[in-house]
Amino acid sequence: MMSVDDVKMYYDQAMSFLGQGEIKKSLVFFDKALKTDENYSPAWNNKGIALLSLEKYSEALDCFEHVMALNPMDSMVIYNKGYVLLMLERYQESVDTLELFLKRYSQKDDFYKFGLYLQAKGFYNLKNYEYAELLLQKAVKKDKNFKEAQELRCIVLKEKNSAD
């Protein structure tokens, strides 16, 4: 019978491969960990991140939803899910998910500004330029050197002005 130690061993091996950029090997070990304990949420979350890096967005989304079912209070998995939904061009769902993340997460952490940026991207794709601009202003206020947010803000302002 497999033990908690086996799950941890497989998980650690998967994380080691993931850290070395050996994504496919990491997936093999995430699966071994999950076969040993199907409710081990760190393995589900990091398997989702590995799949994300392979652009297997639907599979990554399944992993993140699994983590949310196991641990609905995990803010980072909410962020990951919002990001994946954006990649899948499911903009409204992405915006809604990221809203939940932003409500729960510390404004002091860097992921908060990235959450603002991703949500702004979703609103931009929904052609809600006003709200996208507002979120990007907040993101740039948090970090004056946030280049991606500054660039998207310029694009949003251009679109907004041509729509007026």
Image: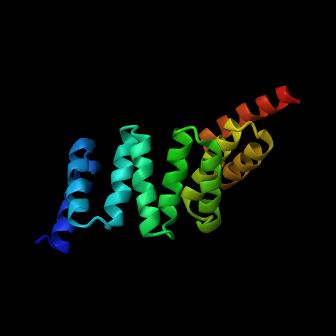
| Between 148 and 143, the one nearer to me in the picture | 148
Q: Write the residue at 35% across / 58% down.
A: 44
Q: In which quarter of the image is the N terminus?
A: bottom left
Q: Position of residue 17 (x, y in %)?
A: 22, 49
Q: Write the residue at 77% across / 46% down.
A: 131
Q: Quadrant of residue 59?
A: top left
Tell me if 146 is positioned left or right of 136 in this view: left
Q: Position of residue 22 (x, y in %)?
A: 24, 43
| Between 30 and 146, the one nearer to me in the picture | 30
Q: In which quarter of the image is residue 126?
A: top right
Q: In which quarter of the image is residue 56?
A: top left
Tell me if 136 is positioned left or right of 83 in this view: right
Q: Position of residue 76 (x, y in %)?
A: 49, 61
Relative to residue 71, is residue 159 depicted above or below? above
The figure's colour scheme reads rainbow
Residue farthest right in this picture? 164
Q: Write the residue at 39% across / 54% down.
A: 63
Relative to residue 47, is residue 124 depicted above or below? above
Relative to residue 54, is residue 98 depicted above or below? below
Relative to residue 62, is residue 90 depicted above or below? above
Q: Where is residue 79 in the image (x, y as percent from the top left)?
A: 53, 56
Residue farthest left in this picture? 1
Q: How many numbered markers are drawn?
A: 0
Q: In which quarter of the image is the C terminus?
A: top right
Q: Write the residue at 76% across / 40% down.
A: 128
